[in-house]
Image (cartoon, helix red, strand yellow):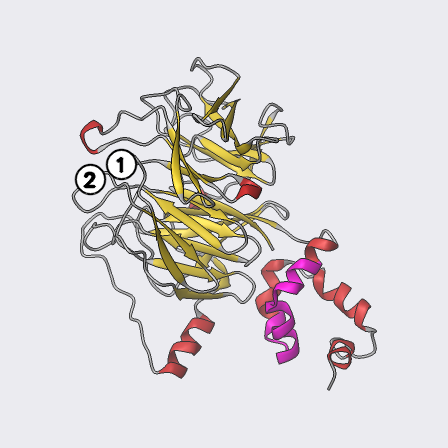
Amino acid sequence: MSDLQTRQDLIPGLPEELAMECLIRVPFQFHSSVKSVCRTWRTLVSDKSFNKERQRFSKAESLLCLVQPLTSPPSPMIDAGEKKKEEEEEEGESHQQQQPRVTGTPLYGLSVYNATLDTWHRIVIPEQIPLFCECVAIQDAGKVLLLGGWDPETLQPVKDVFVLDFFAGVWKRGKPMSAARSFFACASVGSTKVYVAGGHDDQKNALRTAEVYDVERDEWLMLPPMEEGRDECHGFSTGKDFGFCVLSGYGTETQGQFRSDAEVYDPVMNSWSVIENVWPFQDLSPRGRTAGGESAGEIRGCKLWCFIDSERQSEPRWEVEDGSMKWKVVMETVRLPVTTMTSVFAGSLSGQAVAMIGGGGEESGTMMTTADKNGGKGKWSHVNTPPGFSSLPFSYSSIYV
């Protein structure tokens, strides 16, 4: 049977084009049900081209994926464990879910806010994910990765890599990183790769090491080490130039004193360069306070948002370059609707600023977003946040499906 004949049979009596237009309009939360109708629909909906069609017709949904402590039993709308279970049974493998042995250790889960439909759900995962793992999305591959963090039983850094294929609805373990690390910088670069650098080891030593993961090949490649060890650093893509920027962090002997500089990895030269005076807040971590990763114009680099409390003093914008004037970082401040006494985790989603509020007060336990796409300079508005999803996340990523 030809491909055309297969497509014409998607919905009996309808031409291929109309059948496709009907299916791409099905909300993402029902895709698992669509896949169960028949093998043809499962193959179609699981393919990357189906997501491209949804984007072409402006039917793709914007999802914000949050790694956050679980405050209530999961209420899943996507079961990524069922197909994983079937695959394990076919291969004669079995993975039993282990319970944490450390009293009082919080469990972490992957929550998803659908900004298009204004809904929340939690992804079902066949095993416990590490505490403080990093979350990064690769849009073209339709995948979200959870990397590193702490083992929930031993509270030691791990090398673990979990890969969720949003199109197929399947979880799997990827090849582990070469080094166990947590609180490190990471970012997706290009259509298939994720860079990681820095963080700390099991002795709380700040790491200089860096590596890159190819999600399609399931392979890691070591990179040259950074010039400085950087714990609690934050990572960004430099956009079309495929570079990787590692912002701030602190050294082993200066814990809690955040560096003002950044390092940028150049994939062409296979080397790092330092950009001075990027981060002006020695007492403030860039994690949960910076977002972006856009191109900074003709000069290669990235444009970032710097989220600051309403009472903190800061320049509205600053630009810095490395010594060769090859890489540039442009920072624009976004005023959060909170005081310095309130805990917050901020980021971006579909060009809008997003902030999760904690630390008490009437705004605590809610998520807010700006009403426009102008770097959070518009009016902030509340997002309906159910109690089970109101804890501050550790990391996040966003993806269109």
Looking at the image, is mark 2 or mark 1 nearer the viewer?
A: 1
Res 286 visible: no
The residue at which mark 1 appears reads as 229
Residue drawn at (62%, 80%) of the image: 39
Residue drawn at (49%, 34%) of the image: 291
Q: Is residue 282 left or right of residue 323?
A: left
Pointer 1 local density, CA inside 10 Å: few below 14, some 14–19, many at least 20: many
Name the mark on residue 205. Answer: 2
**Does the segment drawn in magenta span residue 50?**
yes
**Badges 2 and 1: C-beta atoms under 8 Å apart?**
yes
Residue drawn at (64%, 60%) of the image: 51
Give the residue type that dot 1 points to. Gly
Pointer 2 local density, CA inside 10 Å: few below 14, some 14–19, many at least 20: some
Q: Quadrant of the C terminus?
A: bottom right
Q: Which residues are magenta?
A: 34-53
Q: Is residue 98 left or right of residue 196?
A: left
Of all residues shown, which one is farthest toward the bottom? 1
Percent x, y for residue 209?
A: 29, 45
**Does the segment drawn in magenta span residue 71?**
no
Q: Nearer the viewer, residue 248 or 392?
A: 248
Dominant secondary structure (helix, strand or loop) of the stretch shown in magenta: helix
Percent x, y for residue 129?
A: 34, 56
Q: Nearer the viewer, residue 276 or 97?
A: 276
Percent x, y for residue 4?
A: 77, 78
